[in-house]
Structure formats: structure tokens, C-alpha cells
Image (cartoon, coloured by chain):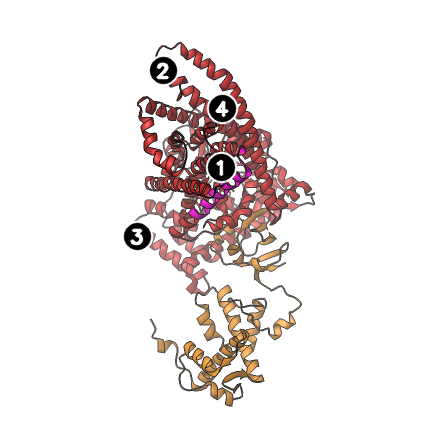
Chain colours: A red, B orange
Amino acid sequence: MPGRTGTSGKGGVSARDGARDGGTQAKGPLKRIVLIGNPNVGKSVIFGFLTGRYVTVSNYPGTTVEVSSGNMSLGARRYIVVDTPGVNNLLPMSEDERVTRDILLSDRPELVVQVGDMKNLKRTLSITIQLAEMGLPVVLDLNMEDEAMDSGIRVDKQALAGMLGVPVLGTVAPERRGLKELTAAISAGGSVPRALSVNYRAAEEYIEKIASFIPRTHISGRSIALMVLAGDKSLAGWLKANLEEGAIEAIEAVRDECALKLATPPEAAGEGGYHKIGQYISEARLRKVSEITAAVLRKVPHKENRLVSILGKSMIHPLWGFPFLLMVLFGLYEFVGVLGAGTFVDFLERVIFGRYLNPMFIKVFGFVPVPFIRDMFVGRYGVITMALSYSIAIVLPITSTFFIAFSILEDSGYLPRLAIMTNRFFKMMGLSGKAVLPMVLGLGCGTMAVMTTRILESRRDRLIAIFLLSLAVPCSAQLGVILGMLSSLSMKAVSIWLLCVVGIMLVAGRLAASILPGERSDFFIEIPPLRKPAFQNVALKTANRVVWYLKEAVPLFILGTLVLFGLDKLNLLGLIERAASPVVVGVLGLPRGTAEAFIVGFLRRDYGAAGLFAMHRAGLLTDVQSLVSIVTITLFVPCLASFFIIIKEKGMGIAVAMMAIITPAAIIVGGILNWALRYFRVSV
Amino acid sequence: MIPEELRRPRAAPETEKRQFEDEALETLWEFQEQGRQATLEQLQSELQLQSEVKDGPSVLAMQTDGLVTISDGKVDFTEAGRLRARDITRRHRLAERLFADILALPEYEVDACRFEHAISPEVEEAICTFLGHPPTCPHNRPIPRGKCCRLYARKVTPLVASLADSQVGEEFKVVFLRTPMIDRLAGIGLVAGAEVRLIQKKPSYVLKVDETTIAVDEEVAKGIFVKKI
């Protein structure tokens, strides 16, 4: 076990901060290690082991979209370890991949620990080739050795190490197998896999020409020349910053010449021509990789796990996939809506808070002579009687059960398979099925989901996804509260709610897609193997998320309550309620008091939903009113946290524009539903 | 810009006549394909729309040459005319397939119109075989079968076909790729020469390359051209 220096508040260093860190600390004793590898190979598990920091680990490509770093010490030496989003190619295709490439360009890593999937040796080695071309020292870790064994794949690590000239290890990270050897290899230091050079034949002369323009850095000019040749547009900024004037034009001329030479017929040069060079380079690498793989990998007969293969097939079956999805949804509803929002909430709210905590605090505060303070804590808008009982008694049990269920789904590998089933639906909204991932993650937490949109390829897709997330995807807390309310209404109400939300999503997506310029990007997603969720990871992940919820949500609940309390004391609450009543009472047909729920809904949608939930339980809302209010709150503005993250990702203008569209849209839909339900005398 | 008249030199009267006949026969073929009878006026107006031949060769002359018959103002093929119409339609539609699918020329229709007059039966057969004896043109109209197609009639699987036209459950070798996703696919090892297995087509395409499984939609699958192993 490596010695650990803990997290010491250095959590979540962003890519750019990390890079700046590196600049100042390069002189100091801290050495920088970067974890690189294909998506979903277990980099984050290894990162957790090396640094003692937990970062979310799941079974789908693209879990890590942010760079995290942590400290590690081995013997006397201290290191900074950086975990990066997975890449298939150091030629970036999306924002998350770009982050990784840029770390290699600007971070001067002391050592690259490449983590690979032993089953997928070819893909692993095509990244090793690119690291070799950059001239970076590498330790190669072939992870998931157990899965390779199960699928009858045997890799001769010694032979491979000999051929590459770098240390090669086999590990099973979740079981910590082989990790001691890995740390030993890290402290011994890796080496540049010089033996791994590819001859690009016809492109060689152009590579050399371009490389001669590139200034000497820790990354070889050859590797940058290759990126340029393959048409990497994201490199433009780096080139501008690092090259002399005129060099860029000269490089472009060489690239055009190369495109012309490699493209047949020559007219095909230009946009397609660069593709051609990219392909030419990939094919050359693949030939090299296949050569090595043939020498070190052999397949032996193996038994397939029948259950896993049947499950895997039925999840994505054109027919059985849908009943399977319904089963999953039903399970989720039972676990979160019935057990979490029903049984647990009942117990916490009625028994713990209702019978013990609230009366106790009311008694205690009864001794406080100042009524103002008393009301602030245990009054109608009291921090304890409202904020804490909402956040702890109503939302917490719901969120926790949801997080457990969700972690299991994440770790099993079902989510990307869901993308296969729903691709068509998302196509109708002008999005590709890949957007399923952020959307489904949005059911967990909108804030995280907005960040996950980085895995989408085009700016247009990201914008649409963020918009739909803010509009129509309820987060776990809110969803749970809504499920709780729905569980006491009829099946008809559930269907109407679902129809409204899905319908709005379709219409809004379609509209957004037709307004925003650009084409829908094609659907492409990697499907990870099905895995049995490990109890430890599910528990750890849930615990992390619950802590995160408590840290993030409870203060906002308290803030919201204090706002209500203040408004009430200043007699403004009644005023606002009266002012809002044409909308709340007139349009939505709800009791005037629901305005409170919508006010706090601006802070957190789940808080708003919790307010409605409490009113519903107290019998203050009719069934029709309950339905209208939950449809409205589902569509209502995103919570403050996701608002901030949208500003961070997309800028203030877009965030404000989204709010300006979403708020009236939610009210209009609620109003129409209210009118329709009453006009047609629908009983729910 | 090259002036129009230089780019396409005016054809010799002989060639011009032949081209006119080809166009006329092709148009008549299309009429009959749609189950319609062509009147002389209809045919003439169609032809003037398509090519600007106003004087010179005419449908009436074709009757004299024994390619078509005209009775009650309705035009029909003679036996010889029908065979030639079939050939030219076949060549035209094969050319469209080649230009649209393989060469991805944006104006494949115009190009195919010029190309159809120029290819020999050998070239035609080679193209047909290369394309795997496609049954329809890009507009989904049937391509009349040729001799080569009948020879291969039992082997229905084309030599090179896109994954969208391939059988589920089979293994293929990738021949070439024509999709904007080309670099992404390369990233997971799907390049020309790689082996790929088609797991399913609905609700999305699922492919397996080595130990990697990916899902793509039909647009992408259409751009992955493979050969059965």
C-alpha cells in the first residue's frame, strides 16, 4: 500500500487549475503522473487506489468528464496523480477527449500510467503508439485481467514488455489484484516505448517537414505533426501560441500537399482529404498493433456465462427490450416511489419528526423568550419544522433510495444499452441516442448531467440536451417526491403526467432542433460488458452522493426557508401570493398558498416539489390540483446549482435565455392541462 | 470556368441521333414501368424537357428505324426497341448506384445521364459485379437484370455491401468506410481491413469489433462497406 497524504481539500481541481499547478510545482518535489486510457477501463478505480480519493466509478464510457487530481507518496517521493477522461485516440473528437490530450500537451507529466483493457489489446496499444510518438515515459497496466481470462484471452505480458520496452502489468483493480506491483513499477519509473515506432511510408516526408516547424517541447514534434496531418482542428490554439508567424501557413501548405498525394482521386482532397490522411495514419497504426497483438495474444476456448448472455440479448432485443425497460422502471417505482417515498418518508416524517423531533424542538424553543427567534426555528417557516423536516424527512429517504437504484443501474452497464432502445425516440427530438446518457443521468442530478453533456460531439447537441434537461427531466429528489405524490393518485394521473412531460420534451426538442443550426450528429456509443454491480462500489457511490446532497441541498433548503420566513415577517409573502394569484389561481387553478412552493422551487425544484407533497398529504390539494401542480413543477426552472453550472458551461446569456423560456413554458403547459382537465371533466 | 460549349463539344450527328434514341427509349421505359401508356405528345414534351433537342432526330424517325411503333397516337416498343431500352435503363441506373454509393458524387444523376451512353457491355458487367448486382437504383426503381446477375442469381449476397444491407449474425471484413464518423470508428479499431460482426439491426445497429461492442444508427451503418468472410 502506498502512503497517502489524503485529500487535504484539494478536491476537484479543474483541468486548467491543474495545469497551472504543474507549472509552479515542477520545480518542487512533486512529480506529476497522468492516468491515460480508453474509456471505461478502470482509470478512476486505480486513481482511487493510488490517491485515496474517491471519484465516481461506473460501468459506462464517459463517467469521468472532469479531471481530478490527488496526492500520493511512495517512499520519500511525492506525486500528484491526475485522472483523465477516457480517450480512444489522442486526436480529440469531443470536449472530454480534448481535455485529456491538452493535459499531455501542457502538463509535462513525469510519467504516464496507461491503463488498458486486457481484452482489448489492440485499442490499448494504439494509444501506446501515440504516447510513444510523443516521447513520454509509460507504464502499461492491462486491467480487467479477470474478464480477459473469462473470455479466453491470454496475453504474454513479458513478451509484450520486451517488444515495447516498457513495464507491462496485469491488474484487477476493483479486487486490488496486482496493484502493489503497479505502485512498485511507478516508483521505478517507466520508459519511453521507443521500440514502438510506426512507419507511415508515403506520409513520412510530410511528417518530417511539419515537425521541423514545431518548437522543441517535452512532446515530440513528430507527434504534433501527425495530429496536424490528421486534421486536428482543436490544435489551432496551441499552434498559434507556440509557432512563429508564417509557420502555420507553411504547415498548412504541407498538409494540403500531403492530402493531395494520399487522396485518390486528387479532387477528393480538402475536407475529405484530411479524413483520408487520418485514415491512412490509423490504418498504419492498426497494422503495427495487429502485428504485436498476433505475437503476444492467444485465444483459448472458454465458456460463456449463459445468464449474462441471455440478459444482454434481451436488454437490447427489438421486442423484449421494451418489456425489460418497463420492468426496470417498475422496479424503480416500487423501490423509490413506494418504499422510499412511502414507507421511509412516513416513518421519518410522521414518527421521527412528527412525534419526536418537532415537538421536542418546539418545547426547547418554547423557552426562548424572543418570538422572532422561536418562529425562525420552529414556526410555520421554521428552519427545523420546515427546512430540516422537508430535506431530511421527505427528500433524503427518497434521494437515497434513488441513488442506490441508480448506482446499481450504472454499474451493471444497462444505461448505454438503454441508448440503443431509445435512439429512435431521441432522433425524433433531433438528438442522437448518445444523449440518453446525460438525460438518464439527469434523473440522478441535473447538475452532474449538464457536465456529462460534454461527451456529446456537437455544440448543438449539447445545447439541446442541456435545454431539455433543464426543462423536462426531473432530478432524483424531485422525481422521488413526484413519484410519492403520484403513488396516491390513480394510474391515469401517472399516465397523464408522463404524457405531458414526454410530449413537452418531444415538442421542445423538435423546436430547438429546428431553430439551432447544424446537423444532428450520428449515433455512436460504446456498449460496455454487463457486470455484476459490486456492493462496495454501490455503497461507496451512494454514500458519496448522499453526503454531496446533504452538503449542497440542505443549506439551500435552509436559505429558501429563511427567505420565506423573512417575506412572511415583512408581510410580503401575502403580497407576493396575491400578486401571483392571477397565475397560480387563475391560470393553474391552484390554491394561493402553492405560490410558496414555486418560490422555493427557484432554489431547488425538489424543495418546491416537497412543499407540494406536504400540501397534498395535508389534503390541501384536490387530485386535479395535485396533478397540475406536479406537471408544472416538473417543467419548472432548473435549480440554482444547475443554473450555475449552465452558466459555467455555456455562459450567462444562454442560461438566462433558457430560464426565460422555461418558466413561462411550465406555466403555460400547467395552465393548458388545468383547463383541459376541467373542461373535459376528467377525474384523476 | 470553362465555357459550356467547350466543355461539351457538340456531338457528331450520328452520336447525337443515338443519344436521342437512348433518351427516348429510356423515357418510354419509365412510362411503361409506371403502368402508363405514352402518347406521342407526352413523349415528345418529356424529351424536350430533358434534352434540348428540337430539330434533328425524332420519335417518328425511330418508328422508321424499327425501334418503336405508333398507333392511335400511342407509342410502344418493337422487340428490338424494348431490348435496347432495357439495356440503356440498366446502364443508367447502375451508373447512378456507382456514382451515388461508391463515389458519392453530389450530382450523380446528371453524371449518370452522360455516362450511360459511354460504357461498353464489359464495363457494365464489371460495375454490376462490383456493386454486387444491386436490385434497385438510388431512387428505388428496379435495375433490369443482366446476364451477370442471372449467373450470380443463386448467390444473392453482393460482393461488397453496406452493413445496412448485410445479414445479422454474420462476420465481415471492412472494405471501406464512407461516413462522417470515420475517425470515431477508427478510434475503436474499425478501419478498412478490420473484422466486424453484425449483432442486430433493430432498434439500433449493434456491431462487435474484437472485444468492443458499439451501437450506431442506420446512417452510419450505411457508410460501412463490408465483404462477407
Q: Which residue is mark 2?
A: A373
Whole-percent x, y for residue A606 in the image: 45, 31
Q: Nearer the viewer, mark 3 or mark 4?
A: 4
What is the C-alpha distance between the residues marked 3 and 1?
51 Å
Q: Is residue B219 above or below residue A623?
A: below
- The magenta segment is A487-508
**Magenta stretch: residue A500 in it?**
yes
- For disc 3, the marked residue is A246
Q: Are marks 1 and 2 on the same chain?
A: yes
Residue placed most toward the observer, A538 or B76: B76
Front position among marks 3 and 1 = 1
Q: Earlier in the sequence, mark 2 or mark 3?
A: 3
Residue A587 appears in which quarter of the rendering? top left
Q: Quadrant of the N terminus of chain B?
A: bottom left
Inspect the image, locate mark 4, and give the three-letter code of the amino acid beneath it. Ala
Give the vertical position of A252 relative to A439 (above or below). Answer: below
Tell which subunit mark 1 falls on: A
Q: Chain of mark 4?
A: A
Q: Are marks 2 and 3 on the same chain?
A: yes
CA distance separating discs 2 and 4: 23 Å
| A209 displayed left or right of A54 | left
Q: Nearer the viewer, residue A484 or A276?
A: A484
Residue located beneath label 1 in the image = A443
Residue A641 in view: yes
Compare marks 3 and 1 and give the one earlier in the sequence. Answer: 3
**Left or right, residue B124 beside residue A605:** right
Location of mark 4 (residue): A393
Q: CA distance from mark 4 to mark 1?
A: 20 Å
**Is A459 rendered above or below residue A602?**
below
Residue B113 screen position, x and y as percent = 46, 74
